[in-house]
Amino acid sequence: MKKLIIVLIIGVMLLAGCDNKVTKTNPPTDNNAPSLAAPAKSPSQAPSEQTEEPTPNQPEASVAAPSGDVVAIKEKMFIAQLNDVYLNQDTYLGKTIKFEGMFTQYTWDEQGLTCYLVYRNSPGCCGADGQAGFEVIWPDGSNQAYPNENDWVEAVGVLEEYEEDGYKYLRLALSSLTVLPTRGAEFVSQ
């Protein structure tokens, strides 16, 4: 139950940031390409998607539909890209996601649960008290170690949905979790 509360708080904080600016992008010209405004399709229903290279008029930090390769969540639009993943999760399920952040873990002794999280600090309900990121987990059978508390890491993994106590959650099934020597912005507001 506490795990549900933590995940819900993180989700609400992602959606309730103090900065309400929304950047709108032009709809794709390809009628088969997914639109951010269109209802999400499950991965089995989504048409094959083409990777588009940024043009000089298209900023690198814009939120774009995921390509067939890796969805890189960048520092400049960290919260906007995370919101897009959470709001359009059917579009992203099964996609590989790569992002950087701080590593932490939460343990509930009474439940016997430990959750691992890669996150950045963000605006929340009371100022700068939010956290935005993903729960991460090594796949079953993997005996990979987790980094130390507050290490700056790059997480790469496939977005998956799992159910616990009748509630559905998102997490990354890790393919790599690398401690980086240089830290990025610990606090993000966009």
Image (tube, rainbow, N blue to C red):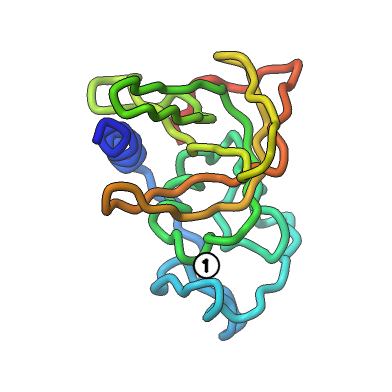
- Please give left or right for residue 149 compared with residue 2 in the image: right
Q: Position of residue 188 (x, y in %)?
A: 48, 28
Q: Residue at x 61, y 45 (%)?
A: 140
Quarter of the image for residue 44 reads bottom right
Q: Position of residue 110 (x, y in %)?
A: 28, 23
In the picture of the structure, the residue carrying the numbered disc 1 is: 26
- Please give left or right for residue 178 compared with residue 78 in the image: right
The amino acid sitting under disc 1 is Asn
Q: Residue at x 49, y 26 (%)?
A: 120
From where the camera sits, is residue 59 visible? Answer: no
From where the camera sits, is residue 1 visible? Answer: yes
Q: Nearer the viewer, residue 4 or 42?
A: 4
Quarter of the image for residue 185 reads top right
Q: Position of residue 4 (x, y in %)?
A: 28, 39
Q: Residue furthest bottom?
A: 31
Q: Nearer the viewer, residue 76 or 3?
A: 3
Q: Position of residue 21 (x, y in %)?
A: 37, 43
Q: Residue at x 48, y 22 (%)?
A: 105
State which quarter of the image contains the N terminus: top left
- Please give left or right for residue 65 compared with residue 128 in the image: right
- Please give left or right for residue 166 compared with residue 139 in the image: left
Q: Secondary structure at mark 1?
A: loop
Q: Is residue 29 above or below residue 25?
A: below
Q: Callout 1: few (<14), some (14-19), or many (20+) C-alpha neighbours within 10 Å?
A: few
Q: Residue at x 73, y 17 (%)?
A: 182
Tally of numbered discs: 1
